[in-house]
Image (cartoon, rainbow, N blue to C red):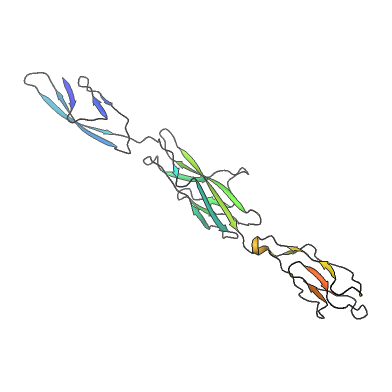
Amino acid sequence: MGALFDSGSNQFSLNPITGAVTTAEELDCKTKSTHVFRVTAQDHSMPQRSALATLTILVTDTNDHDPVFEQQEYKESLRENLEVGYEVLTVRATDGDAPPNANILYRLLEGPGGSPSEVFEIDPRSGVIRTRGPVDREEVESYQLTVEASDQGRDPGPRSTTAAVFLSVEDDNDSAPQFSEKRYVLQVREDVTVGSPVLRVTASDRDKGSNALVHYSIMSGNARGQFYLDAQTGALDVVSLLDYETIKEYTLRV
């Protein structure tokens, strides 16, 4: 009795005596997942008789591919004071395996503080990163997140990979200037020389760039025009004669 394939195969071999089918090279279900053969069994009698059978071999997937992100680093800018739930960006990874070994879930890994971000969250299936808390540039100017993509493979087990997400926060003009003193009090002699500087006020702004530039002006209390406040430096000068007997005190609002 002998057995043989009715057509040649490079990936399988058939023992003509025992009928054992063995692999002749490495199989890949992504290339071909089903192999169908007709096997002939022949006896050695005269006249020779034979029988046919159909052999179907199904190649199942092994989880032998890691997920791969479209980018190893993602960079994005976002405004501060965004509403909660704002979509910042979407990360995406693919897997060369077949389902379910290619089904990918995303998550944010723990940051330096030992817990996932309190400001951002990720949809585990779509990879969309959204805000989950307030974004304040004055508190944090940039964020670095680590996203993990993990497949759901069971044979031999899940595989994962990571990507970095860098987020820079753009400034909003949301901070008011703050004076170094709530109230400035000084004494000036009435015979002070006209043009003399008598005080310099200073204020700072927690915003950034042009939003942090401070300009000074006298809002009230200078009806006679006896003082001049430099808009850039905050220097206060006496620009006309002072007379103690006429006015003993000035209250300027700047």
Q: Name which quarter of the figure residue 43 lies in.
A: top left
Q: Position of residue 219 (x, y in %)?
A: 76, 75
Q: Position of residue 171 (x, y in %)?
A: 62, 60
Q: Is residue 174 visible?
A: no
Q: Name which quarter of the figure residue 80 lies in.
A: bottom right
In the picture as drawn, the residue positioned furthest to the left comes out as 47
Q: On the rendered structure, is 178 left or right of 117?
A: right
Q: On the rendered structure, is 171 left or right of 124?
A: right
Q: Residue at x 82, y 75 (%)?
A: 227
Location of residue 104 with respect to 195 vertically, above or below? above
Q: On the rendered structure, is 242 left or right of 36?
A: right
Location of residue 98 with respect to 205 vertically, above or below? above
Location of residue 17 with respect to 53 vertically, above or below? above
**Image quarter in which the N terminus is found:** top left
In this view of the protein, which residue sits in the foreground, 188 or 153? 188
Location of residue 79 with respect to 249 vertically, above or below? above
In this view of the protein, which residue sits in the foreground, 240 or 158? 240
Q: On the rendered structure, is 203 left or right of 5?
A: right
Q: Position of residue 51 (x, y in %)?
A: 13, 27
Q: Is residue 33 visible?
A: yes
Q: Position of residue 188 (x, y in %)?
A: 89, 71
